[in-house]
Amino acid sequence: MASRNSEQVKQDIVKQFEKRTPKSKKLFMESLKYMPGGGTRNIAYYHSAHRNIPSLRKLYPEPTVDINPATAESLSIKDGDWVQIETKRGSIKSKARFFDGVHPKVVHISHGWWYSYEPEWKSVNVNILTDNSCLDSIIGSESLKALLCRVRSLPEGN
């Protein structure tokens, strides 16, 4: 019975996605090739707090996105480059950090960036990417890990 229920949930999710994706967005959707993972935390900060403490900020001065080196090479991204991560809802920027422990189709985005980026907090906050119109039917949360995104290198100075 449990597997039948989970199969029904999968079918419902696919139907919901198809209903909410107009054909005019099909080309844009086809360009989204990677799955963003969010929530990467580090030892210096507690959730989104403490980014204003200079000694901690030295440890992790910028928001990062972990990307597989092979994926980065295919996109002409170098370790430490600023990149744009874009979903159908919005885009943010982060510094690329090579990590071969990330699946080639996944980019893993650091959590909690907004504070101390005023007034540009929307340019680095991972929540900008989420789609609040398509919530999990069981627990009601947004699905950052069920989105698709595009990643590209930004020109120097961004």
Image: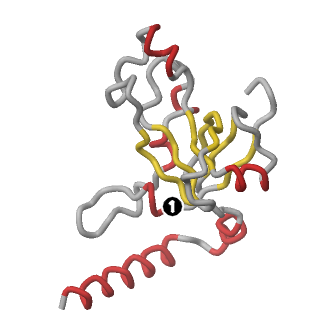
Q: Residue at x 64, y 52 (%)?
A: 68
Residue kind at label 1, given as amino acid type = Leu
**Residue in the image at 48% along x and 77% along y:** 19
How many numbered badges does the structure rendering display? 1
Residue identifier under label 1: 147
State the colouring used for the structure image.
secondary structure
Label 1 CA crowd tier, 10 Å (few <14, some 14–19, many 20+): some
The C terminus lies in quadrant: top right
| Image: 57 above or below 104 | above
In the image, residue 31 lies at what x, y percent? Answer: 71, 64
Q: Quadrant of residue 136?
A: bottom left
| Quarter holding residue 64 | top right
Outermost residue, left direction?
A: 1
Residue 53, placed above or below residue 12:
above
The location of residue 65, given as percent across then percent down, is 57, 41
> Can you name the residue that lies furthest to the top here?
54
Q: Residue at x 51, y 61 (%)?
A: 147
The residue at 31%/86% (across/down) is 8
Question: In the displayed structure, does residue 150 sit left or right of residue 102?
Answer: right
Residue 126: x, y in percent? 49, 41
Q: Indicate the position of residue 9 as horizontal and vertical percent values.
A: 31, 80
Of residues 106 and 126, the one drawn nearer to the viewer in this rendering: 106
SS class of the residue under badge 1?
loop
The quadrant of the picture occupied by the N terminus is bottom left
